[in-house]
């Protein structure tokens, strides 16, 4: 669980960096450039730790990792597409759906043991998450969602959930760094191809983020991916999804430190509930 907590803190920090560094940069363009650094970091880590790349590539289960990585990138593209016109609040509810899908697979299909501690911790975290979402919904006026937005969110949720479940299964037999490297190579390849088709848009809106800042973001997100993968290996998809719910709340607190955004009492209540739930799970 501690790896999962570290991962969600790093992801939240990455969200703050994204807001701090990115002005008019196209998201897929930035992701592809950041992926160059994460791939290099991943290869260096594989070399340093002596992962048997040959054995990994000859393992038939590596194909599942590849498929899961494609689904993960597909979910990312669907999410970015939705956020052009959709709201974070609406996406938050679908993220909650993804958590319950992970729970169904973990505890019904894989018959993992469910403890009272898990149920209590989950209930507290979900309560905090709902308090956060309902407050955001009350404050932010959202337009009625059209069918295409719901389809994007359904596709995003299924892609992310399936990708995580595939990863969890393969972590039982394959090295975490090999899985991470595969994911990052797939991210780099697909986003580079996508960048070709959106090149005219990129040239128009590019904010000129520096290589140094891109490298910083890459280092942070790689650390988040690495700790999250280790956490998933030692925990399960449901617990990983639960801790992921802390990210938007921690991002708000990070924004208050960096951008002096104003915090409201509900943010402290939400964070207290989520931390309490995390303590119970830990």
Image: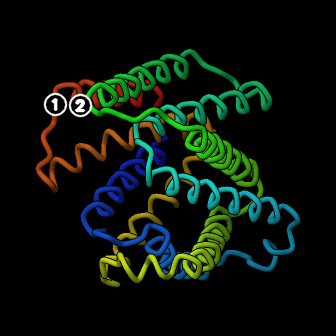
Toward which corner of the image does residue 84 lie, by quadrant? bottom left
For this view, does 151 lie left or right of residue 18? right
Circle count? 2
Between 93 and 112, the residue placed more toward the observer is: 93
Residue at 59%, 78% in the rendered image: 197
For this view, does 3 lie left or right of residue 17? right
Residue at 56%, 57% in the rendered image: 76
Residue at 23%, 43% in the rendered image: 253
Residue 195: give x, y in percent of width and height.
55, 78
Residue 214: give x, y in percent of width and height.
36, 77
How far is mark 1 from mark 2, CA to CA? 6 Å
Mark 1 and mark 2 residues within 8 Å of each other at the beta carbon:
yes
According to the picture, the residue beneath numbered tag 2 turns out to be 267
Residue 150 in the image: above or below residue 226: above
According to the picture, the residue beneath numbered tag 1 turns out to be 264
Q: Quadrant where the C terminus lies? A: top left
């Amino acid at each position: 669980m501690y790896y999962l907590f570290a991962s969600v803190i790093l992801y939240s920090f990455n969200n703050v960096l994204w807001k701090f560094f990115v002005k008019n940069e196209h998201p897929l363009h930035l992701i592809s450039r950041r992926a160059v650094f994460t791939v290099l970091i991943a290869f260096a880590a594989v070399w340093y730790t002596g992962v048997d790349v040959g054995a990994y590539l000859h393992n038939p289960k590596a194909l599942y990792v590849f498929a899961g990585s494609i689904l993960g990138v597909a979910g990312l593209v669907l999410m970015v597409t939705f956020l052009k016109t959709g709201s974070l609040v609406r996406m938050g509810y679908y993220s909650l759906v993804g958590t319950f899908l992970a729970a169904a697979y973990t505890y019904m299909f894989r018959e993992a043991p469910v403890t009272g501690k898990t149920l209590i911790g989950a209930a507290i975290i979900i309560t905090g998450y709902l308090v956060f979402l309902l407050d955001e919904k009350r404050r932010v006026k959202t337009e009625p969602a059209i069918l295409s937005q719901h389809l994007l969110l359904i596709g995003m949720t299924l892609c992310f959930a399936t990708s995580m479940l595939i990863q969890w299964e393969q972590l039982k037999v394959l090295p975490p760094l090999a899985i991470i490297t595969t994911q990052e190579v797939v991210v780099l390849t697909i986003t580079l191809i996508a960048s070709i088709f959106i090149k005219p848009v990129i040239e128009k809106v590019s904010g000129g983020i520096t290589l140094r800042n891109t490298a910083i973001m890459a280092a942070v997100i790689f650390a988040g991916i690495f700790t999250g993968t280790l956490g998933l290996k030692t925990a399960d998809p449901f617990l990983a999804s639960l801790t992921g719910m802390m990210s938007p709340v921690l991002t708000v607190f990070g924004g208050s430190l960096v951008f002096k955004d104003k915090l409201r009492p509900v943010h402290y209540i939400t964070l207290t509930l989520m931390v309490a739930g995390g303590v119970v799970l830990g």
